[in-house]
Amino acid sequence: MSRAERARPGEGAAEGRNPPLDDEGERDRGPPGAPGSRHGLGRIEGERPGPLVAVFAGMHGNEPAGVRALERVIAQVTADRIPVHGTLVGILGNVAACELGVRYVDFDLNRLWTPARVDRMRAMTREECLFVEELELWELVREVDRLIEGAPAQPSPVFIDLHTASASSAPFAISRNTLDHISLLRGLPIPILAGLEESLEGLLLKHIIERGGRTVAVETGPHQGQNAAEELEAALWILFATAGTIASESIPGGRAGRDSLRELCRGIPPIVEVVHRHEVTDRSEFRMEEGFRSFDLVSKGRLLAIDHGKQVRAPRRGRVLMPLYQERGEDGFFLGLDRDRLYLTLSRWFRRLHLEWLLSLFPSVRRERELGDAWRVDRSDREWVREALRFFGYREQVRLKGGTILAWRRRR
């Protein structure tokens, strides 16, 4: 069966839940999150005003723990009649992949949310979708649009994305380094990965940020870990309280979930900044060395993987993040550095004040204006220069022949 055939209604991998939306999306299907809809995992309308809090789970079909955690939380809020401020919505991401239990069918749904593709989805009809994840995206773009357009302007809506990793990992959060986002994480006793979204394109949460929403992703591992759902569930309760959708005293079990998360993350710094990504171009040619957990410390030169028959070693001392131990994926591993809040605050303000011109004062560094917002480093052995580039947000660094480095703020 071709990709186009699998994307058609009632056939192939997309079959199983309620029929997808019609072309115009005008059929009366109820509000986003309603259990009768294809992507709906639950919707609770509070009796008191408050924010819209939308939780996504199952953006990857081999990550069932997030779906279980979200369903349990919604069921408990409903059964215990926990007072809700605003609206709480649960959304299932890649329905087709979840039914098959695979990360994705044709393409990673959480890499498709680029501005150009989203605009194309809005202009397309359903029958024009060419592959399974394009159909899923077509439907979810409309659900997200409805959520944001129906949300109160203040406070801004909150979107939470639940994930698990293929390797064992302490729970962690991914969020943007701005005050409105960081404020969502106060009281959540798990480390924050900073800078990850700057090295990846097409993330759902980046699309939400562009629409004015606040976002946070929570991840733990491994996929089939016995406690993964419980860890995500504990994080959800805390995030709901921080966002203002439920009262802290209404969290089931009181502080037990918070204390459990804190113990799981003991010894890990509160903030780890992603400074390196190893991209996998052919999964069949990539093999991660066994035994790594997220946040493991590795020294410079440590053998991490074999890619196309070549050894991949740690470019510097740091923490291994999300090592790839599953059949599909484009991210072999990330490398992070321990940070404190002062570093990230100064970095954000230096960028806001457009002080990157200071980089031109460094030896062997010059701006490449013909390449856009890029810098050239002729002496790439000077690690402190590369660290300065990262401080100003130029985290995408490509090594050319002869050792020259080109650095961009956004992936090119």
Image (cartoon, rainbow, N blue to C red):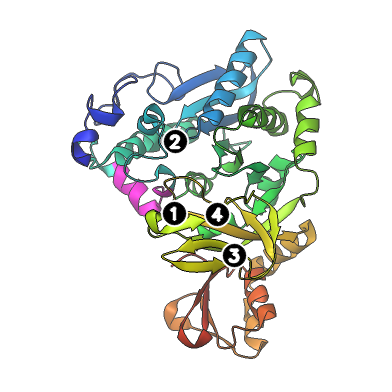
**Mark 1 vs mark 4, CA separation in Å:** 14 Å
User: Which residue, given by chain and number where applicable, does mark 1 sit on?
Assistant: 330
- Name the amino acid type tagged 2: Val
Q: Is residue 200 above or below residue 54?
A: below
Image x and y of residue 336, in percent = 65, 60
Secondary structure, mark 3, is: strand
What's under tag 3, amino acid-wise?
Answer: Leu
Q: Quadrant of the N terminus?
A: top left
Q: Which label sits in the foreground, 3 or 1? A: 3
Whether residue 238 can be seen here: yes
Of the numbered discs 4 and 3, the one sitting upstream in the chain is 4
Q: First in sequence: mark 3 or mark 1?
A: 3
* Mark 3 lies on residue: 303
How far apart are the alpha carbons under marks 4 and 3? 26 Å
Q: Residues within 10 Å of mark 4 (few under 14, many from 20)?
A: some
Left or right, residue 96 beside residue 163: left
- 247 is higher (above) or lower (below) than 182: above
* Residue 197 numbered mark, or none: 4
Q: Main secondary structure of the magenta part?
A: helix
* Mark 2 residue crowding within 10 angstroms, few (<14) / some (14–19) / many (20+): some
Q: Which residues are magenta?
A: 111-122
In this rendering, the label closer to the viewer, 1 or 4: 1
Q: Which residue is mark 2?
A: 144
Mark 2–mark 3 contact, CB under 8 Å? no
- In whole angstroms, how far apart are the C-alphas of marks 3 and 1? 19 Å
Tell which circle, 2 or 1, labels the residue nearer the N-terminal end.
2
